[in-house]
Image (spheres, grey):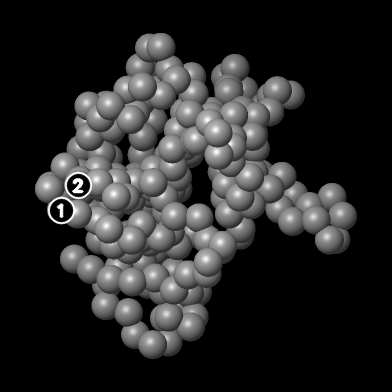
Amino acid sequence: MNIRLQSVNRKNPSSLRRQIRQRRRQLPVSTQRRNSRLITRHLKHHSVFLNAKKIGLYWPTDGEVSLVELCSLRNKQFFWPILQERVRPWQGRGLLFARTSGRWRDNRYGIPEPVSRKLFRARDLDCILVPVVGFDEALHRLGMGGGYYDRALANLNPWKPTTLIGVAHELQKVSELAHNTWDIRMDGVVTESGLRFRSQRDSLGEPLD
């Protein structure tokens, strides 16, 4: 079910963000688990995911879809996000990725991060599964508002594209999101209903562009 945007939400993404997060948290645990299983299954059977070797994952919080089951797959390397705080006032916050050796520590938001000295940029990965707060028909993404993913995805390699797949429950879809020309759209979005891609037909046969 799409959320119909009010004019206040177009001008105030924080209001829309709170609304969607509340809806997501209100999903019954059984529904969250079911959606996570379905989404994991969609990814496991799609060529884009199957052909990727280095995959960016995330630790689910706040009702986000859990994809931890993917870690059992062989012939895949999974990388977890590590927040990079600004060192100088004029520097922005960043996001790097690392594999885990089994050691974790919580970041400033209480989300586990791998303890590793070997860090990778987003452009080093084949595919990144990006948690989204909201998304629209054109696959614009509404994030948590910290700007970490925005900055990490701003310098992808155009000669060796990294596929960006947003991950969400279907109820996080909205009719339209306000966006800027420099915003980076997802290449695809996966929900319990299937995997959609830009400029292609999704698994349900619906054109996105």
Quadrant into which the C terminus falls: bottom left
Which residue corresponds to the image point at 39% horizontal and 70% vertical from the top-left?
177
Horizontal and vertical percent position of residue 114: 61, 29
Which residue corresponds to the image point at 55% horizontal and 33% vertical from the top-left?
159
Find out whether the residues at labels 2 and 1 contact each other: C-beta distance under 8 Å.
yes
**Residue 162 sits above or below residue 76 on the image:** below
Circle 1 crowding by C-alpha within 10 Å: few under 14, some 14–19, many from 20: few
**Dot 2 corresponds to which residue?**
201
Horizontal and vertical percent position of residue 98: 61, 28
| Residue sitting farthest toward the bottom | 7
Which residue corresponds to the image point at 59% horizontal and 17% vertical from the top-left?
101
Helix, strand or loop at disc 2?
A: loop
Q: Amino acid at mark 1?
A: Glu
**Dot 1 corresponds to which residue?**
206
84 lies left or right of 193: right
Residue 33 in sight: no
